[in-house]
Image (cartoon, grey):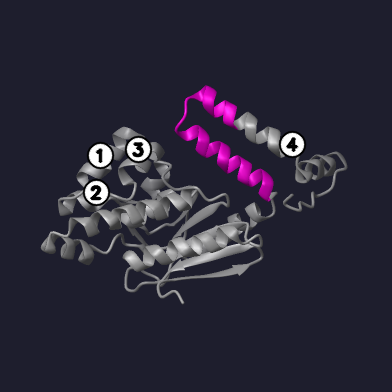
Amino acid sequence: MAEFIRYTIEDRVAVLVIDRPPVNALNEQALVELGTALDELNANPDVKAIVITGGGQLAFAAGADIGLFGKIIKEQDFATGKAFLELGQSTFNKIEASNKPVIAAINGICLGGGLELAMACHLRICGDRVRLGQPEINLGIIPGWGGTQRLPRIVGPAKATELILTGDQITAQQAMQLRLVNMVVPGGEVMRQAKGLAAKFANKSAVSTTAALTSIRAGLDACLPDGLAAEREQLTKVVASEDAREGITAFLEKRDAKFQDK
């Protein structure tokens, strides 16, 4: 049984909770459990969207377990350090590669590895009093779970460079202005809004949702012609699906579509 990661499933929406008090810092076991939970949810046909949030009222995730880094440095055990970095990157890559929409419900502290986790999700709903940042530079290190790569892609290289090199924290409102988060809501509304958005996704065809996510990912790191080719490929597959036939027929008949994810 998992110790730090738990999830529930209701109405085709999975809510995955990081529960490692007091601030949900991510250690090796938490990352392994997170990866295992993601594998289970992605393989479950009854799940069509995933919400990731932090347990308790204080933090989404305060980052990597700095105590482990201290032990690594003290013992000069850099092989363990490299393995920890690779585990974090591979786990977050799994989130980004999910064919089901993953929403970060940022309900508290979101720093370092916590922000890197949130950025690996497809969308981010943020409480209005949350502070976010990549403070690793203040410890004499740099982000290692995707911060130097995903942050520039989301907010642009100049602002990302500023945030990474200063280690400054920003408010939820500033994050919204930078388009780092999709929505800022009162703290008590974070989960309701995230689950509401997930429910909206869950009502769509899993076939077209998967195709859309695949096409978006393909285009992010490709030139426009290659991205367009990926889009054509995905749409060609989707058009042949039963859900596409149902969706278009329902539109023409002026009724709600009843998708079967086929």
Whether the residues at callouts 1 and 3 have beta carbons within 8 Å, the answer is no
Q: x and y percent of residue 221 in the render? A: 44, 33
Residue visible at 80% across and 39% down in the picture: 248
Residue labelled with disc 2: 168
Regarding mark 3 in the picture, which secondary structure is present there? helix
How far apart are labels 2 and 1 at the CA level?
Answer: 8 Å
Residue visible at 79% across and 49% down in the picture: 257
Regarding mark 4 in the picture, which secondary structure is present there? helix
Earlier sequence position, callout 4 versus callout 3:
3
Residue visible at 88% across and 42% down in the picture: 253
Whether the residues at callouts 2 and 1 have beta carbons within 8 Å, the answer is yes
Whether the residues at callouts 1 and 4 have beta carbons within 8 Å, the answer is no
Q: Residues within 10 Å of mark 1 (few under 14, many from 20)?
A: few
Left or right: 110 in relation to 82? right
Q: Residues within 10 Å of mark 4 (few under 14, many from 20)?
A: some
Please state the extent of the stretch shown in magenta in the rendering.
206-230
